[in-house]
Amino acid sequence: MPDQLQLFTVFKYIHTTTVLLTIIGFTIRGIWMMRGSPLLDTRASRTFPHVNDTVLLISAVSAAALSGQYPFINIWLTAKVLGLLAYILLGAVALTYGPTRGIRISAYAGALLSFAYVVHVALTKNPFIF
Ligand code: HEM
């Protein structure tokens, strides 16, 4: 039977794999958005991110629980959750709700910065940039 550390490692691998898939998918959909491509509205383009995000969050919560680190207790995890919320909101404006191309592209840039911030916090376990 796998011990707690092995399970944590498995969830962390799943988590980082879905993180990678998230940024690859978001980059592709961003290019489609900027080109005004109809591919952005296909069923696969709308469904896959939800499936991937669900696995990302389940693996994140599992890794957090197995390592005894929790948002609102460990400040770096709180920063990750807030960064994730910013990424989700800006991403929704960029790919769905932005009323003009300028707003969509600005929101897209903001979402990429939020994502980079979350990765920085994940790697350093430090919510501060400097
Ligand atoms: C856009 C959202 C997210 C990104 C880009 C992200 C990124 C990452 C990355 C790159 C790692 C691997 C760090 C390493 O190799 O040491 C990691 C680990 C981890 N993440 Fe996330 N993450 C996100 C969301 C979350 C959320 C919302 C939570 C918590 C509820 C979370 C909890 C964790 C935990 C517990 C680890 C393992 C940390 C450790 O090694 O002790 N992540 N994350």
Image: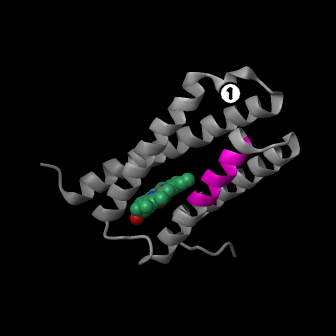
**Residue at left 68%, top 22%?**
39
Observer-nearest residue: 8 or 27? 27
Residue 82 appears left or right of 31? left
Observer-nearest residue: 50 or 98? 98
Location of residue 93 with respect to 31 vertically, above or below: below
Across and down, in percent, residue 47 comes to 52, 30
Reading the image, the residue beneath label 1 is 40
Rendering quarter of residue 100: top right
Across and down, in percent, residue 96 comes to 69, 39
Q: Is residue 14 among the parts visible in the rendering?
A: yes
**Residue at left 64%, top 39%?**
26
Q: Is residue 115 among the parts visible in the rendering?
A: no
Location of residue 22 with respect to 83 vertically, above or below: above
Q: Which residues are magenta?
A: 84-94
Observer-nearest residue: 129 or 55? 55
Residue 109 appears left or right of 86? right
Q: Secondary structure at mark 1?
A: helix
Q: Amino acid at mark 1?
A: Leu
User: Which residue is at the far right?
Assistant: 102
